[in-house]
Amino acid sequence: MTREEILKRVDHTILNPAATWEQVKEICDQGMRFGVASVCIPPRYVRRAAEYVGKNLKICTVVGFPNGYSTPEVKVFETEDAIRCGADEIDMVINLGLAKAGDWEGVLAEIKAVKASCKGRILKVIVEACLLTQEEKVAMCRLVSMSGADFIKTSTGFSTGGATVEDVALFKRSVVPGIRVKAAGGIRTFEQAQAMLEAGADRIGASALVGLMLQGE
């Protein structure tokens, strides 16, 4: 797979809390230039970015990020606000406390509520795999499969670990057909990205890959 082909599956990401509009604008310019799948940006900049790029680029943003412990009602409000502002895709963090307690009904209800508020837009469910046991990872694959969401996503990139080839392969085996896998967190080279795609990832979340293209010019 060429670098250009890999970039078409990348959510080009800037989620630094100190990110400025100028930095987000630069990410958008790079995203349009290299034909990435989307740019994943802080909610505060969604409206401005959507107006800036028009129909030339998909805008992704985050909900319940990065800790996931806000209430379902807050996550629904965040989602509805993001959609009103022009977001095309939503990446939500699950309530990890509920998952660790085995409250699978609570986790499922929250994902379903956020999906309903997406109004048909793509929903990716971040499960923070580095904090889950193997059994919990499989359980989350089952819940995401039941929820109506579109993707299961490995990581926020803000916790104790990021995507691994092993987790991506496990997720791909464990979700039902039609549910896609997004690998994110710590993917800094095209070799790492390709390994994730070969393991079953459909989308890559990364901030470094476009920079590697620019360095090669």
Image (spheres, rainbow, N blue to C red):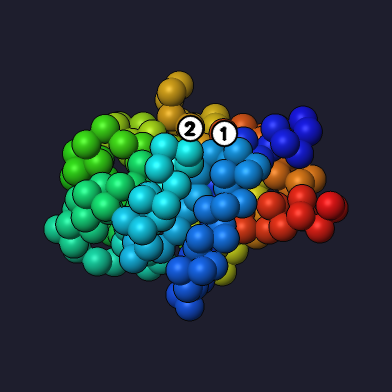
Q: Quadrant of residue 67?
A: bottom left
Would you place residue 160 above or below residue 215 in this image? Answer: below
- Seen from this angle, which residue lies furthest bottom? 18
- Hey, what amino acid is under mark 1? Asp
Question: At numbered mark 2, what does the secondary structure look like: helix, strand or loop?
Answer: strand
- Is 11 placed left or right of 33 in the picture? left
Question: Looking at the picture, how far across and down is residue 209, in whole percent?
Answer: 70, 52
Question: Looking at the picture, how far across and down is residue 80, in whole percent?
Answer: 20, 50
The residue to which callout 1 is attached is 202
Inspect this view and state whether residue 24 appears: yes
- Count neighbours of disc 2 (C-alpha within 10 A) and say few if under 14, some if 14 to 19, many if 20 or more: many
- Seen from this angle, which residue lies furthest top? 177
Q: Residue at x 54, y 67 (%)?
A: 23
The residue to which callout 2 is attached is 180
Question: Looking at the picture, how far across and down is residue 205, in whole percent?
Answer: 57, 50
- Is 6 placed left or right of 185 in the picture? right
Q: Residue at x 57, y 44 (%)?
A: 32
Q: Residue at x 40, y 43 (%)?
A: 54
Along the polypeptide, which appears first: circle 1 or circle 2? 2
**Distance between the alpha carbons at the discs numbered 1 and 2:** 6 Å
Marks 1 & 2, CB-CB < 8 Å contact: yes
- Hey, what amino acid is under mark 2? Arg
Residue 145's label in the rendered image is none
Question: Looking at the picture, how far across and down is residue 27, in whole percent?
Answer: 56, 57
- Is 18 placed left or right of 215 in the picture? left
How many numbered tags mark residues here?
Answer: 2
Name the foreground residue: 71 vs 86.
Answer: 86
